[in-house]
Amino acid sequence: MIFAGILAVTPTRRHIHVIVMMAVIAASTAGGILLILDFLDGGAIAHGVGGWVAGIAIPFAADMFTALMLAVTGILTLTCAWFAVASGRAQSRFFAPMLLVLLAGVNGALLTADLFNLFVFIEVMLLPSYGLFLLAAPDRAPIRRIAGVRLYVTLNLLTSTVFLVGVGFLYGTAGTVNIAELSGLAASDETVAIATAVCLFALGIKAAVVPVHGWLARAYPTTSPAITALFSGLHTKIAIFAIYRIYAVVFDGDPRFLWIGIAVFTVTMIVGALGAAGENSSRSMLAFNMVSGIGYILLGVALFTPLGLVAGIFYLIHHMIVKASLFLSTGAVEVRYGTDKLGAFRGVAKTEPLIAAAFFVAALSLAGLPPFSGFVAKLSLILAAQDAGEIVAVVVMILVSLVTLLAMLRIWSGMFWGSRSSEAASSLDAESADEESADAASVAGSGTGTAGATDTLTRTRPRIGASLAAPAIVLAVITLGLGLGAELLLGLAQIAADGLLDTSAYVEAVLGS
């Protein structure tokens, strides 16, 4: 927040803004990694801001689950910021300040142990997000862009209002909004359970759970690929994190209500996968696939067994990395070739082998094929559902994985594979000539290529430079590493899951702060 304020009043020197922004994000990421090392033996730490007594001070708390999320959100913010700079969508003097405020809100939402301050930090996340949504958006199709941001703002205002109402009901019934002080109350008091359910419903809207999922697939593709990738790893995942935390602490994992989650999240998987089948652009398809993945992640908390929570947390980390990689790889193609519509051009793999390889790796991981992280995540979740006797969920997960694989193959064949035709060249020229000319100045001299759309399909050398391709490649390598070295992340997820099954360390740390 301090550096965001400094950059906001600093005269526009793009290289200084970029250096400071990247350094601050890297430092925040390093902090998350150091916290992971602190929690290898389990436990939790907490701090009351300002030295006030417990119950009055604003409490911040962390355990392994929090630390994992801090580290991964930092990595995603770093790679997406890198992509935004490389693609020329970070030109505004306010881009870096708003991105840092967004990250501050994310960190605060992950660390707070107070539901009202969770609302506050979600708002801190949202306010710069509205600006980033427009500042980084493509110049073409202004009406579509405005419609997208209008939907995004309206939906989030609704979500915030519902969540605040739930927090008010909770304070009225329980007399506190401190998560530790609410420990187990929803399991023993039905009025507290209903009030907390309102909060969970609002978080479900923000997480794009069926039936309140359509906004994500319509809003996210209307901004730039960098911001789409960033939001995919931050906004919905913060809501998912909060659902895990609230149900574990406030409901104490009460099994009476788990059937609701299993039913809703299983349907979410199906709707997201089928929704992707009806789209004809890569980002729209990936947005619907994202809805499907959210169903997988939340099924872990709906099972609320040791293996279910481990699988859900592993899937959460995997999905954040893989989905961002897919958005950035297809986004790199969109930035340099002018469109993400399937069939507008083909054969990108022939001139862009690195970005094609990054997409291929992330796509196979999303579909759940070995040796990538998606295979471990889905197999763990299937075994957890089988152990819990949820056979319908097992069948749905397997079928949805097949549909997801077909969707990824459709993007591959419609964008990366095949031969280039003159008809496709004409189509691409008509769609992207205006954007190519507008982008030429911003990418000139960057080493990423500035040729017009007409020769897009006749070039034999890459148009996507190393700086633009690197973020997607880095994340694809990470998902491969998490698959081959899954034991490490599974061990960390086990520690995080233990903290959710037995919340005593977290509660005691917060109450003692």
Image (spheres, rainbow, N blue to C red):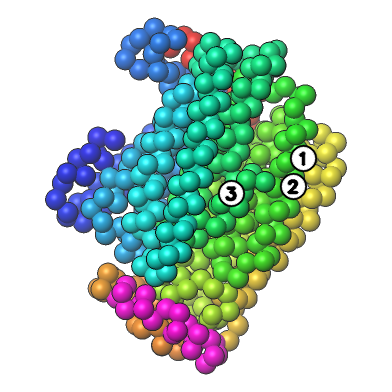
Are circles 2 and 1 on residues that touch, CB within 8 Å? yes
Above-or-below relation of 413 to 211: below
**Pointer 1 local density, CA inside 10 Å: few below 14, some 14–19, many at least 20:** some
Above-or-below relation of 98 to 246: below
Q: Position of residue 325 (x, y in %)?
A: 51, 57
Is residue 42 left or right of 466 when viewed as pictured?
right
What kind of residue is marked 3?
Answer: His
Res 485 seen here: no
Which residue is under mark 2? 267
Q: Position of residue 400 (x, y in %)?
A: 74, 55
**Pointer 2 local density, CA inside 10 Å: few below 14, some 14–19, many at least 20:** some
Closer to the camera in the image, 289 or 408: 289
Residue ID at (25%, 73%)? 441
Q: Secondary structure at mark 3?
A: helix
The stretch of residues the image draws in magenta is 420-440
Is residue 424 left or right of 381 when viewed as pictured?
left
Which residue is under mark 3? 319
What kind of residue is marked 2?
Answer: Val
Q: Which quadrant would residue 338 be assigned to in this image?
A: bottom left
Q: Position of residue 422 (x, y in %)?
A: 52, 92
**Pointer 3 local density, CA inside 10 Å: few below 14, some 14–19, many at least 20:** many
Marker disc for residue 263: 1
Pair 1/3: label in front:
1
Q: How many angstroms separate mark 3 from mark 2 (CA)?
A: 18 Å
Q: Position of residue 416 (x, y in %)?
A: 56, 75
Residue ID at (61%, 38%)? 204
Q: Which quadrant would residue 371 be assigned to in this image?
A: bottom right
